[in-house]
Image (cartoon, rainbow, N blue to C red):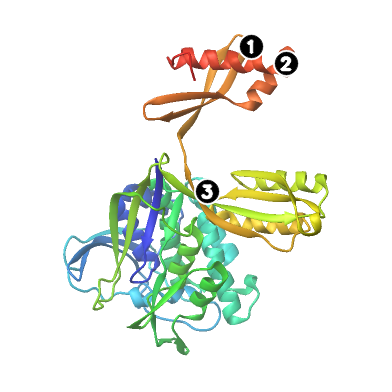
Amino acid sequence: MGKILYLECNSGISGDMTVGALLDLGADREVLERALGSLGVEGYHLHFGRAVKCGLDAYDFDVHLEEEGHEHGHDHECGESHGHDHEHEHGHEHGEGHGHDHEHTHSHSHGHSHSHIHRNLSDIYGIIERLDSKEEVKELARNMFLIVAEAEAKAHGLPINEVHFHEVGAIDSIVDIISVAVCLDNLGVKDVVVSPLAEGHGQIRCQHGVIPVPVPATANIAAAHGLALRLTDQEGEMVTPTGAAIAAAVRTREKLPASCRIVKTGMGAGKKDFDHANVLRAMLLETNEEENDQAWVLETNVDDCSGEMLGFVMEELFAAGALDVWNTPIYMKKNRPAYLLSTLCMENDIEKMEDLIFVHTTTIGVRRYPVSRTILERRKAEVETRFGNASVKICTRNEKTFCYPEYESVRAICQCHAVDFQTVYYEIQRAARTTYDQPEKY
């Protein structure tokens, strides 16, 4: 069974909404608090509670800064890289239902002012490095911050190493971004689909003036990472730069499969009250790999590539994650002999595959079309033979099991024992049949 997280951004997306939705989905709060405690960042405490939005119960997660006069994301600060202070549209206007089931977790704080401190990307990477978690969690957090920093650098016309995050915005976003990375890992989610991001319109006021919605950093992230924005008639900001960076970094596929089963849902509350439910809904979905699954075929006709060139690009495509690659002899116009290069891949790999085809062949165009597949549930296993251990692929369908020796295992045994291919292949099949109690006929 494949597991997919679907983020339904019908009311935009922000960092705190995402964390709330993932906690509501089942991410372990204690795991999150331990992870954040390992950072050594002070001056804030966490709020865990519930809020009601248009009659819907949602998880209310918030970061409260303990420095006097500052709360989570209230102020826009235009100018030098202030992208992390855009959270105010999901800010602290707690609406209906805010008063029940509130809990707070306090970090250690010395209570002194941090307003004069600025952090650059390298400083934030240093904080992330202290995180007591897996390397892939740290890498996801670094990537999210990099996406925001790149967008802010472009917005303000600065080199990325000159982008500085004010202490207020930095603490807020450090907590939100690392919390998202930790919660995704805790949920075991690898595959994520993000809906179009509903965004408001108009203008918002920041410390140094009025800026348009979507704010420049959010617009830059959407443009750089192919995020779809759905502009609405809601006044004000609904997609924050942090939220856009999260969507860009965690998304692994463009759309949902044709069919899936909803395992669980979670909702993270925004802080403003709209005429619609200001929530981010996260849905954990399961797909059955035995059912039809969609992939894409990329095709190109080439009549001026050498065999070595085609062999090399095939290797590169497989190394990049192609599901299959094949060459078919064809005749083109004027009866020129040529080859049809075909590549089977998943939708999110199309651009990468096309880049390799354009770089490593002489083609100037690639066709593509979707195909449906029926995929057997499969797993790899080891069996013991008289030649030693060998790998097999175990596939099942309708309570039937099929065992297929892996080519590399057959090849290795043949070379090591000077035995012919068929003898080794059927020896491995017999061992698999015995191990998995299968009938003689496969």
Looking at the picture, does residue 47 appear above or below residue 413? below
Of the residues under marks 1 and 2, which one precedes in the sequence?
Answer: 1
Residue furthest bottom as drawn: 209
Question: How packed is label 2: few (under 14 Cα within 10 Å), some, or many (20 or more)?
Answer: few
Comparing 380 with 328, the one in front is 328
Q: Nearer the viewer, mark 3 or mark 2?
A: 2
Q: Are marks 1 and 3 in contact (CB under 8 Å)?
A: no
Comparing 208 with 200, the one in front is 200
Q: For the residues marked 1 and 3, what is the alpha-carbon distance in whole angstroms? A: 38 Å
Of the residues under marks 1 and 3, which one precedes in the sequence?
Answer: 3
Residue furthest top as drawn: 386
Q: Amino acid at mark 2?
A: Cys
**Residue at the spot 54% in from the left edge and 58% down from the top edge:** 142
Q: Is residue 401 left or right of residue 314?
A: left
Comparing 357 with 79, the one in front is 357
**Residue at the spot 81% in from the left edge and 45% down from the top edge:** 307
Looking at the picture, does residue 44 appear above or below residue 298? below
Tag 3, which secondary structure?
A: helix
Q: For the residues marked 1 and 2, what is the alpha-carbon distance in whole angstroms? A: 9 Å
Q: Are marks 1 and 2 in contact (CB under 8 Å)?
A: yes
Q: Position of residue 425 (x, y in %)?
A: 62, 18
Q: Are marks 3 and 2 in contact (CB under 8 Å)?
A: no
Kindly identify which residue carries mark 3.
136
Asked if residue 23 can be seen in this view, the reply is yes
Q: Nearer the viewer, mark 1 or mark 3?
A: 1
Q: Is residue 28 left or right of residue 206?
A: left
Kindly identify which residue carries mark 1.
387
